[in-house]
Image (cartoon, grey):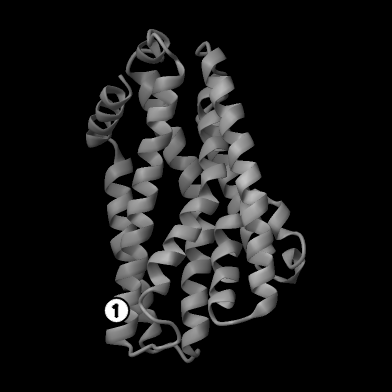
Amino acid sequence: MFFSYLKADFLKTKHLSVRTAHLLISIVTPLIFIAYDSYAPWDDYVKIDLYYQVIGMALPFLIGLFCAILSEQEQSAGCFQMMLMSPKKVVPFLSKLLLLLMFCAGALLVASLLFGVAFRFGLHGKVVDLAFYPMAALVMFVSSIPLYLLHLYLSFDSNKGVSIALGIVESVLSALFLTGLGESVWKYVPLVWPARAVATFFAAYNGEMTACVELKQVACIGFFVITIGTIVYLFWACRWEGFRIAD
């Protein structure tokens, strides 16, 4: 049953911008940064750090937008009737969560590898080896899971405006928390993890002991947050009745 829903949800995205957006963003973004970095005066460390910071800042808004699009599609197709008629209401919600996570993982991996290969062989950057880039994509992917849980809940329990608006706020907060403002507290704020986690991983990868300690701390907190968040999400999905406030 689950894979039938997953296949159906994937086919539904054929006529949505979600699938195309993930592909285009993952290709265009690294190309823009490589073109800019080819004449930017900064050192290689700053260029790599900035690339992942920008992606991390944009990710909350994009997550809010993509979750809202999926919710809007279900509402337009029949006011959520297909989801409400499911023998187990948790299944379609798990399907949508997994679909978006798969899109996210694929897009981040492509964006990271494309940038890494171009930076290493095109710009001859040797601050880190190629093994860093897929690991950076993995760190950003895992750190974004709480946001998907939150925004899918908001999109289906409230309306698309709430999810998108919160995504914008999260992106702004991510930018603020990249400054000294979030230096000691960012690990306790899951909304800004995509931007800060990779920056911390980058520092730890280059041997900074403080960053290594921070990374271990946020990994423990993240495991707890993702576990509890998933349980709450599944419990809510089981009790969901299609209620939604009009836009």
Q: Quadrant of the N terminus?
A: top left
Percent of width and height locating residue 231: 59, 29
Percent position (x, y) of residue 224?
65, 43
Residue depicted at 65% across the width and 53% down the height: 220
The residue lying toward the viewer, choosing from 176 and 236, is: 236
- Please state which amino acid type lies under the numbered disc 1: Ala
Residue 115 placement, left or right of 4: right
Please, is residue 73 above or below residue 145 in the view?
above
**Which element type, helix, strand or loop, lies under badge 1?**
helix
Question: At 69% from the left edge and 60% from the top edge, which residue is drawn?
Answer: 217
Q: Is residue 209 above or below residue 93?
A: below
Left or right side of 189 for 83: left
Q: Say whether residue 11 is left or right of residue 110.
A: left
Q: Nearer the viewer, residue 169 or 204?
A: 204
Q: Position of residue 29 (x, y in %)?
A: 36, 65
Identified at 67% across, 50% down, the residue is 221
| Residue for badge 1 | 118
Q: Residue at x 42, y 10 (%)?
A: 84
Look at the image and tell me whether residue 247 can be seen.
Answer: no
